[in-house]
Image: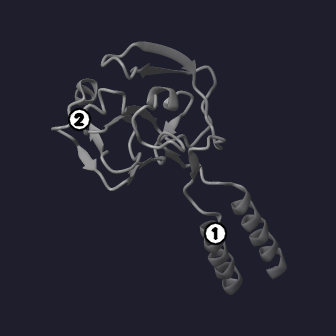
Amino acid sequence: MASYNAGIVCALLVLCMVVPSLATVYTVGDSTGWTTGVDYSTWTSGKTFVVGDSLVFNYGGGHTVDEVSSSDYSTCTAGNSISTDSSGATTFPLKTAGSRYFICAAVGHCGSGMKVAVTVAKASTTTPSSGGTTNTTVTTPSANTPSTTTTTPSTTTTTSTNSSSGTILSPIVAVLVMTWFAFSLLVLS
């Protein structure tokens, strides 16, 4: 009986090391980071942000990351920011579904395109049926009003090949949890 339990525990440990976490960490602007001269609407295209993911902003001095409302995003107004940071490395966990808006509050930066909007979808616990659609509004950096609405099929992605993303849960954590579970099973049997 003990060897059977040990076999199950070993199989579970291997499974936990193979299956990565579903949450993704996106580095805004990839290796370029949060700076002027980047088309962030292009950066967001093709990405699916879900509850549990995080946005990481890496930037130098003279920049900020301000989370703002939709109207403040459209007009590049930073006076009513929901939150602001100028530390050079800012992480925003995406905890709820909906739209999130970020700008740089330095004079002229937002107006020059240093702003990004993301739509966060609910995290899926089951595989969705195919054929659904997602409406995405893309705002171009040179205009302050939405310019394009596209409809694309919705998909669920569990892994990412994008260089700006990574997994949140380390496999080491999974191994430690499973080791504790295995030890508990062996002690109780």
Q: Which image quarter: residue 163?
A: top right
**Mark 2 is on which residue type?**
Val
Query: Which badge, 1 or 2, comes first in the chain's sequence?
Result: 2
The disc labelled 1 sits on which kind of residue?
Answer: Ile
Q: Nearer the viewer, residue 113 or 167?
A: 113
Colouring scheme applied when the structure was drawn: one colour
Say whether residue 171 is left or right of residue 51: right
Cα distance between the residues tagged 1 and 2: 44 Å
Image coordinates of residue 67 in percent, x first then y, are: 29, 41
Residue on which the image places disc 2? 107
Looking at the rendered structure, which numbered label has been put on residue 164? Answer: none
Q: Residue at left 61%, top 29%?
A: 155
Q: Is residue 165 above or below residue 100?
A: below
Determine which residue is flagged by label 1.
172
Rendered location of residue 53, percent (x, y) = 49, 47
Q: Which corner quadrant holds the N terminus?
A: bottom right
Mark 1, secondary structure of its residue: helix
